[in-house]
């Protein structure tokens, strides 16, 4: 394994160790951005090195997509976080000491997610995801308001239950490979399990997948295991909402996909597709209905994340090169757009001093720049052309129509439903008479604009090399 | 070799009994003591596996379970309970009788499920796995039926006990994972402790029901 791979893990953890002892939020915020940028460069470096695997780490087409996306959003979210946290300190919502830990934990979380994404060992995968979850629990409770504590508690309880079931599933997966691969490390290595998938114990593999689906599915936020997600998104600091939606959900989905590939490679085991399709559709339609009743702006977009994770799970459940391609593309587009929206929402909430949708009105009069940004983000996430989400949703729907025509009206219905809810809520916030409190916000437009421009470019033109790369990953996903 | 089966099944069975005891205890200190007993039995079970499977590094896991979960954590929680002044009865959402019935059902479920699915696995692992799953499900049940934050912590840690029992029963499962489990329990305690103190700070109670007033969307 090339040393460049270890940098992806070493940089964030080293930065976390340094950040925890440094005083001053300006310095730590700047270092946080710098470390995230270096991690992003290390992520890009993966494109140069030869894919390969050792007993602990793996680099292949699938996880390169996830890692580059993750480190990119990690970098821009750190940038956004620098201006956001500055405002929070001025208004006294957080203390300097908790900000110091906040930055250290941010880096540790990025490192833990990279461990999960790079691991070739199914135990290490679990450790990385569990560590990232525990860190985000603490970050969700950062404000120490009753709501924040309740959200963090709920997240912690549901998250740990999910992670315990996933661990039991991991033990079962190890036992499934033990008879063929022998004791010890080989039976935990994903590449070896995948290469020998046909010889694994079928009954154990089936049982393992059920536990892993429930366990990691909780983390993905699939209904009915989603209860923690809206609370955790709405009560934590907004950079964390962006990171939860844009990164952590993807990492959990990645874990699920690895095991889906494993079980799909065994011809005698159950088909994972139908289960994923059902869970994806239930999440999509349920979340689309829930969007109509939201009163809190961050909660609104949290439900929108459930909706999109549902659609992505649906696409991967369909399987096959085209649906997988659409799923990967939609995941990328959703990460970029949703984190951009949370960047905008963070500044909107600071400008209006509230997260209540009813109290946010006339944004186009008081803060035109924010209004344009939020409006563009919502149009993109609702799936309007020319943004990239339109293209990926279109691909998912056309593939479904071509392969399972009777199934296709369901995701189409969910998407239209969500579209209506988002536009309805947005109209009140952007237009109408301006009322209530209004503050000026110093915001850096870069992270937001960068994401939306990427999504826009992807909607207009996808470079051939990118398409090839996604096609290889989709092919490999099976 | 027969005695190897007997002893490990005996210890696993004892842990299961402790899980049931956790379900019906209605005083918080008794719950804590029962948990400590379960952790010590776990330590014995892990040590036995270490000896039978000839994997000396498992003794580390046994030592961690014995020292940390058998003594340090219960004592820390004990101090906390007295400092918060909550050494009283625990409110239960569902009656004891019904809870026990549910528990029996869960044990039957996990036995029939695991024994059926693991016909290919080595037989020592099979029953161990079935009992481990039963302990995990009983821990979940305990977390659901108790409203108190401290008993929820204990429910979660008893789930971890079941996980470690299952992981050590799986022959040759690498040490990486065992250390990580012990480690995660430590972190979990840290996180939980922070929360419990914050909950106290805000609400003057560790009754989780007090948290539910802010559930859902704020009006």
Image: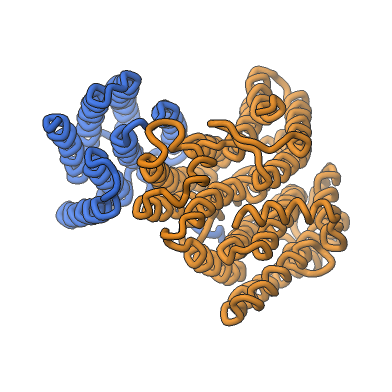
Chain colours: A orange, B blue
Q: Nearer the viewer, residue A59 or B95?
A: A59
**Residue at 29% over, 53% down:** B117
- How far across and how far down the image is residue A30, in percent? 78, 28
Q: Nearer the viewer, residue A227 or A36?
A: A36
- How far across and how far down the image is residue A301, in percent? 65, 58
**Residue at 51% over, 64% down:** A273
- Residue A324 lies, with reference to residue B144, above or below; the image says below
Q: Is residue A58 visible?
A: yes
- Residue B125 lies, with reference to residue A462, above or below; the image says above
- In the rendered structure, the answer to whether residue A181 lies left or right of residue A46 reads left
Instruction: State the quadrant of the C terminus of chain A.
Output: bottom right
- In the rendered structure, the answer to whether residue A325 lies left or right of residue B200 reads right
Q: Quadrant of residue B93?
A: bottom left
Q: Is residue A93 visible?
A: no
- How far across and how far down the image is residue A365, in percent? 86, 61
**Residue at 59% over, 63% down:** A319
- Residue A440 lies, with reference to residue A16, above or below; the image says below
- How far across and how far down the image is residue A172, in percent? 37, 45
């Amino acid at each position: 394994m090339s040393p460049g791979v270890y940098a992806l893990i070493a940089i964030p953890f080293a930065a976390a160790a340094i950040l925890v002892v440094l005083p001053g939020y300006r310095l730590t915020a700047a270092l946080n951005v710098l470390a995230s940028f270096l991690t992003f460069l290390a992520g890009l470096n993966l494109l140069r090195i030869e894919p390969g695997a050792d007993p602990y780490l793996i680099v292949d087409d699938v996880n390169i997509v996830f890692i580059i996306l993750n480190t990119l959003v990690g970098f821009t979210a750190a940038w956004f976080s620098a201006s956001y946290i500055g405002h929070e300190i001025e208004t006294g919502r957080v203390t300097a000491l908790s900000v110091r830990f906040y930055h250290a934990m941010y880096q540790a979380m990025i490192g833990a997610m990279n461990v999960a994404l790079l691991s070739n060992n199914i135990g290490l995968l679990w450790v990385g995801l569990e560590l990232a979850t525990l860190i985000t629990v603490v970050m969700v409770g950062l404000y120490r308001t009753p709501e924040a504590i309740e959200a963090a508690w709920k997240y912690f309880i549901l998250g740990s239950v999910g992670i315990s079931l996933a661990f039991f599933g991991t033990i079962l997966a190890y036992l499934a490979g033990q008879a063929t691969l022998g004791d010890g490390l080989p039976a935990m290595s994903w590449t070896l399990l995948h290469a020998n998938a046909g010889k694994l114990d079928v009954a154990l593999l089936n049982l393992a997948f059920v536990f892993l689906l429930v366990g990691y599915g909780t983390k993905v936020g699939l209904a009915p295991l989603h209860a923690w997600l809206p609370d955790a998104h709405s009560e934590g600091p907004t950079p964390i909402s962006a990171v939860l939606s844009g990164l952590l959900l993807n990492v959990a989905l990645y874990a699920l996909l690895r095991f889906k590939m494993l079980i799909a490679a065994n011809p005698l085991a159950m088909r994972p597709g139908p289960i994923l399709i059902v869970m994806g559709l239930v999440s999509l339609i349920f979340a689309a209905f829930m969007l109509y009743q939201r009163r809190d702006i961050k909660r609104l977009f949290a439900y929108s994340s459930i909706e999109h994770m549902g659609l992505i799970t649906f696409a991967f459940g369909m399987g096959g090169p085209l649906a997988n391609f659409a799923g990967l593309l939609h995941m990328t587009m959703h990460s970029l757009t949703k984190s951009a929206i949370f960047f905008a929402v963070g500044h909107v909430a600071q400008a209006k001093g509230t997260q209540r949708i009813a109290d946010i009105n006339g944004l186009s009069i008081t803060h035109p720049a924010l209004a344009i940004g939020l409006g563009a983000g919502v149009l993109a996430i609702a799936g309007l052309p020319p943004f990239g989400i339109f293209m990926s949703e279109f691909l998912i729907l056309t593939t479904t129509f071509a392969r399972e025509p009777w199934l296709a009206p369901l995701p189409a219905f969910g998407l239209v439903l969500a579209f209506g809810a988002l536009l309805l809520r947005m109209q009140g916030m952007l237009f109408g008479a301006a009322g209530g409190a209004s503050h000026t916000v110093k915001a850096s437009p870069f992270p937001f604009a960068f994401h939306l421009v990427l999504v826009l470019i992807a909607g207009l033109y996808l470079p051939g090399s990118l398409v090839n790369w996604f096609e290889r990953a989709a092919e490999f996903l099976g | 070799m027969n005695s190897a089966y007997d002893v490990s099944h005996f210890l696993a069975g004892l842990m299961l009994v402790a899980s049931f005891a956790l379900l019906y205890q209605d005083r918080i200190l008794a719950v804590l003591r029962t948990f400590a007993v379960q952790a010590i039995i776990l330590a014995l079970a892990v040590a036995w596996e270490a000896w039978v499977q000839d994997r000396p590094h498992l003794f580390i896991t046994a030592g961690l379970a014995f020292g940390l979960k058998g003594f340090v954590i219960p004592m820390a929680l004990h101090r906390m309970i007295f400092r918060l002044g909550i050494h009283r009865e625990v409110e239960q959402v569902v009656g004891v009788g019904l809870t026990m019935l549910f528990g029996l059902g869960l044990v039957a479920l996990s036995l029939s499920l695991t024994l059926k699915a693991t016909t290919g696995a080595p037989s020592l692992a099979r029953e161990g796995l079935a009992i481990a799953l039963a302990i995990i499900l009983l821990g979940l049940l305990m977390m659901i039926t108790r409203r108190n934050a401290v008993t929820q912590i204990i429910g979660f840690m008893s789930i971890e006990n079941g996980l470690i029992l299952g992981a050590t029963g799986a022959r040759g499962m690498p040490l990486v994972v065992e250390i990580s489990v012990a480690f995660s329990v430590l972190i979990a305690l840290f996180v939980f402790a922070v929360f419990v103190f914050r909950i106290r700070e805000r609400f003057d109670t560790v009754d989780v029901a007090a948290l539910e007033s802010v559930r859902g969307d704020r009006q």
